[in-house]
Amino acid sequence: MSSRATPVLHRDDPDKDPLVGHVKVTRQDWLNMARDVLVNEGVAEVKILSLSTRMGVSRSSFYWYFENRDDLLAALLDEWEARNTAQIVAHCRMQAANITEALCNFFRCFVDPAKFDAGLDLAIREWSRRDDKLRARVDTADATRIAAVIAMFETQGYGKTDADARARILYFMQLGYHALEVRETMKTRMSRLAPYIQGFSGQAADPKALRAFLDDVAALNLP
């Protein structure tokens, strides 16, 4: 991402006007810009002066919200866990009448970009390749996520060993889907949903649960 004369900051609330130059930015604006740079250019490019230039504000305004660059990076990691890991755990714990509904709940986390930030997840994993401390934190996050998926299968009556294997197949597939940057329309992706569910669960997909999920995906109007 290159510097822009009139930078537009990515607010969480799209109804708010974008912030530019002379308008004071918020802590979340700094985090959003830092996240954009991390995802698109890597952690080495997340620099205070560069971020302030991109946003058209004084570098000194950074220190209203963060002590230093390390503090900003720590906040990014906290946001990643609060958003991505927490979303997966929450969706795995949703009530489900059967395994099809449970799996659809899991997938709901990933089809909606507002719930799971795939770009951020991949950027942090790339960052962790050169940071052993961060790699340990990523490993802990993966363990937490997998444990939630295992519990989801166990809740649906799968034995411990079976639940463990199926959870890993499901989770590693989902992360691999993002890592490979698979290019297909949502229509194509959803056309494979029923056989996917049968493969992950060992059971034929429940038509009612399948239809409810497909209706939810259609409402998102994703390409």
Image (spheres, rainbow, N blue to C red):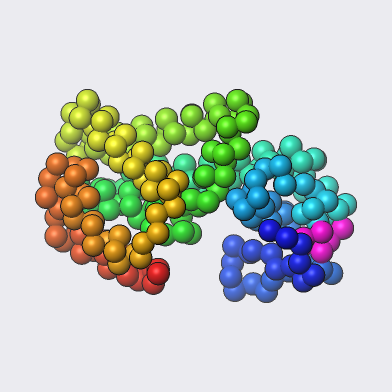
Displayed quadrant of residue 157: top left
Residue 206: image x %, image y %? 14, 55
Residue 179: image x %, image y %? 45, 46
Residue 8, above or below 193: below
**Quadrant of the frame with the N terminus:** bottom right
Q: How many marks?
A: 0
Displayed quadrant of residue 93: top left
Displayed quadrant of residue 161: top left
- Going 19% across and 44% down the picture, which residue do you hit? 199
Res 81 visible: yes
Residue 118, above or below 10: above
Residue 106: image x %, image y %? 33, 48
**Quadrant of the frame with the C terminus:** bottom left
- Going 60% across and 25% down the picture, which residue do you hit? 132
- Observer-nearest of 187 and 92: 187
Residue 76: image x %, image y %? 63, 44
Residue 55 inside the magenta-drawn segment: yes
Res 31 visible: no
- Observer-nearest of 53 and 107: 53
- Observer-nearest of 147 and 48: 48
- Going 64% across and 72% down the picture, which residue do you hit? 16
Q: Horizontally, is 126 left or right of 92 in the view?
A: right
Residue 49 inside the magenta-drawn segment: no
Magenta segment: 53-58
